[in-house]
Image (tube, rainbow, N blue to C red):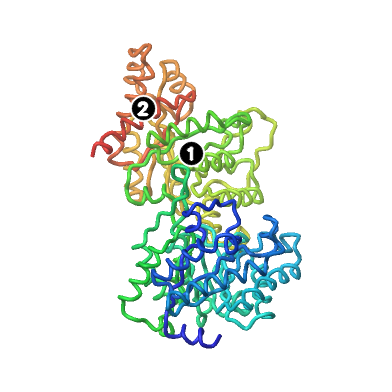
Amino acid sequence: MSNLLERLNSEVILADGAMGTMLHSRGVSFDKCFDELNLTNPAAVADVHREYIEAGAQLVLTNTFGANRFKLGKHGLEKKVTEINKAGVELAKRTVAASFKDVLVAGDIGPLGVRIAPFGRVQPEAAREAFAEQINALCEAGADLIVIETMTDLHEIREAIKAEKENCTLPVVASVTFTRDDRTVLGDDPMKVARTLHEAGADIIGVNCSGGPAQLLRILKQMRHAVPDGKFWVKPNAGWPEQVGGRIMYPADPDYFGDYALSFREAGACIVGGCCGTTPQHIAAMRKALDTAPEINPMHITMLPAEEIIETAQEQPTQFAQKLAAGKFTISVEMDPPRGLSTHKLLAGASLLTEAGADVINVADSPMARMRMSAWAVCDVVQRKVNVETTLHFPTRGRNLLRVQGDLLAAHALGIRNVFVVMGDPTAIGDYPEATDNYDLVPSGLIKLIKQGFNAGVDHSGTSIGQPTNFFVGAALNLCPPDADHEIKNLHRKVKAGTDFFITQPIYQAKDGEGFLAKNELKHGALNKPVLVGVLPLVSLKHANFLNHEVPGISIPDEIIARMEKAGDHAAEEGVKIAVELIEQIKPWAQGVYIMPQFSRFDLIADIIDKVKEPERAA
């Protein structure tokens, strides 16, 4: 043990890449037991070891990741735990000996594949016994160290470390995997994980699998900040896996890994390598980078300041937020949730709009106070099945403080990050006029709660919610208000609360928006927030007259009414032309549009998007 740990004080060791990826590329199905290949096809396993050694790996993991009694039991192999693990070590050692190179053999141990109490039925003692069975076999066969990897549950990895310490004197690596939000599946952050593994007795603290190198570099920095004197192991996936043509593909290429090998070393990693999706080519690129760059003594690496650690841990802004920040003209389209259970038409419409070029889908919440499917569920379904970001309409009306905050947590858990805060329609106008209509917060109050509370990691009472949320928050704006001074006052209350962007009610004359913003600028200076202007395409003369005479806040100029009347049976096409003209006129002073389809005419909205995007596509 002391020899390896002393070696890591002055050297960065390069480990191998993915065993499973390589075996699968040789035709082994994912539903087969890879560990059994140590007995049934040892040549295939040995070939993988050999390729990684030839690529420059100084440490190879045995093909025993799932060789515990629980996982092997699913293949009827629970009685072969010792045989399979010993064969895995012997295979690796024979391959190393044949290479005439100084390569370490690490006995590889993965999760048991069952939940440990208190989150599962397997008691800690039973888990520790299963780990001990595998560890004893690996040690007896002559492994140089033990690697416990790809763990998600701190309860389980503590039992594994304890089993190793009770049954073996080899150094132990304890490595955890993280989700996209830099948390484990059970919600533990990198600093807590590092401290827990250190206190449990891990000789080397690890992070593996998860996402690509960029995420693991971020996590490594946080772990090292928590345990400054620790030794660290990093083996990232080749990016987040994607399904292309029925195949699982990983986007990170070898050269990218080569660059990150140096970044990991500079951040304090002692052992680096690759996990899922990585190949000998990735390891060769890392070998080349490490060999050609100047040496760095891991013990002399400078610690990052605390504020940089905190910054790197933050979630990336939404694509919608990034487009607005980059000054791109953004198209958002509103969709109403279905009245019943079926989401087929909704998804078909969302797919059409996304293919046409919509940047984000806005999901209304019980518009006109009519009973519809939860907007939360619709956002989740659209994001998962159409692969487009959504903006959740979040009314304050009808929600007390408890429900507001619970709903915010629910939205974040579903992956919803863009929210549009509105008062909401009064129940008196809807399907259930007798329903209660109380609320504890006005929109500016809810915006403040989100931006200054939840996004800072605390609830309304100041109690920690565990980690900050990352909501991008919009608010409503009326560009044609009956009382401009009152609207400007509300506007600045929302800006002060932390609003990120504004969505306006529909207008039909660009000069209305320009006039309001100019008046605001005279009083308070230019509005330094993106404005998405509401565009409600007309589909018929009857529709235009209804909006003009019966919907408060909408005023349609006589010349547009005349154009709709003249168009006759082609009124819908004329409505598209009017909308496109309006959008072109507002482009100089607005950063996007918020289009509201009428009567589910998503085809008309797709035509509008096509015409608006045409110059951009031509360029």
Q: Position of residue 455 (x, y in %)?
A: 52, 58
**20, above or below 422, in the image:** below
Q: Is residue 60 above or below residue 73?
A: below
Which residue does the image show at 44% across and 85% down from the upper left?
299
Query: What label does residue 386 carry, if any?
Result: 1
The amino acid type of the residue labelled 2 equals: Asp
Q: Amino acid at mark 1?
A: Val
Q: Which residue bears the numbered disc 2?
A: 607
Label 2 environment density (alpha carbons within 10 Å; few <14, some 14–19, many ≥20): some
Mark with earlier residue (1, 2): 1
Q: Toward the viewer: 19 or 613?
A: 19
Q: Which residue: 40% across, 28% down?
A: 605
Quarter of the rendering containing residue 156: bottom right
Task: Tell me where residue 472 appears, x and y as whole percent.
Answer: 47, 51
Residue 614 vertical position relative to residue 416 in the rendered view, above or below: above
> Observer-nearest residue: 367 or 276?
276
> Closer to the camera: disc 1 or disc 2?
1
Secondary element under disc 2, as helix, strand or loop, is: helix
Residue 192 seen in the figure: no
Judging depth in this view, the residue of 186 and 575 nearest the camera is: 186
Residue at 67%, 55% in the rendered image: 75
Image quadrant assignment for residue 606? top left
Based on the displayed image, in which of its 4 quarters is residue 431 positioned? top right
389 displayed left or right of 375: left
Name the residue located 67 percent from the left edge and 60 percent from the top edge.
72
Quarter the N terminus occupies = bottom right
Label 1 Cα neighbours within 10 Å, binned few <14 / some 14-19 / many ≥20:
some
